[in-house]
Image: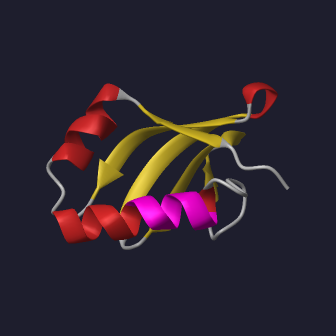
C-alpha cells in the first residue's frame, strides 16, 4: 500500500509551529507511520456524511482533515492539542 502525501492548511501550520519539540516529533512520526498509509483507518471517523472529511487523534493531537483520493493527498485543516 502506498502512502498518502501529507499537507497542512495555514491554520494547521500555525498550530504545528506552536507545538513543543517533543510533541511535534511524536506527532510527525504518528502521521507518517499511522495516518499516511491509511487515512480511512487508524480510528478515524467521518465528519457528517462525507467519507473524505475526517477526524482522528494522532499522538494525543486531534486533527481534522480531508482525503483527496485522486491525488493521494491528506490535507490537515485543524490541529488541536493541549
In this picture the colour scheme is secondary structure
Residue at (71%, 64%) from the top-left corner?
A: 41
Residue 63 is at least partly visible in this image: yes
Name the image quarter holding the C terminus: bottom left
Residue 16 in percent (x, y) is at 26, 48
Q: Nearer the viewer, residue 80 or 46?
A: 80
Residue 82 is at least partly visible in this image: no
Position of residue 3 in the picture relative to residue 53 (left or right) = right
The reply to whether the magenta stretch includes residue 32 is yes
Q: Nearer the viewer, residue 36 or 67?
A: 36
Residue at (29%, 61%) from the top-left corner?
A: 24
Position of residue 10 in the picture relative to residue 43 (left or right) = left
Name the image quarter holding the N terminus: bottom right
Residue 7 in percent (x, y) is at 49, 35
Residue 12 in percent (x, y) is at 32, 39
How would you classify the magenta stretch by its main secondary structure?
helix
Residue lying farthest to the right in this orientation:
1
Residue at (49%, 67%) from the top-left corner?
A: 30
Q: Quadrant of residue 37?
A: bottom right
Position of residue 57 in the picture relative to residue 71 (left or right) = left
The answer to whether residue 19 is above or below residue 66 is below
Residue at (36%, 43%) from the top-left corner?
A: 78
The reply to whether the magenta stretch includes residue 14 is no
Q: How many marks?
A: 0
Residue 52 in percent (x, y) is at 69, 39
Q: Quadrant of residue 27?
A: bottom left
Q: Find the magenta span and give its range.
A: 28-34
Amino acid at each position: 500500500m502506498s502512502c498518502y502525501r501529507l499537507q497542512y492548511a495555514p491554520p494547521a501550520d500555525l498550530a504545528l509551529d506552536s507545538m513543543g519539540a517533543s510533541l511535534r516529533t511524536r506527532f510527525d512520526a504518528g502521521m507518517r507511520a499511522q495516518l499516511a498509509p491509511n487515512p480511512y483507518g487508524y480510528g478515524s471517523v467521518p465528519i457528517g456524511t462525507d467519507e473524505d472529511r475526517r477526524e482522528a487523534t494522532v499522538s494525543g493531537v486531534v486533527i481534522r482533515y480531508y482525503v483527496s483520493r485522486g491525488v493521494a493527498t491528506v490535507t490537515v485543516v485543524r490541529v488541536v492539542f493541549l
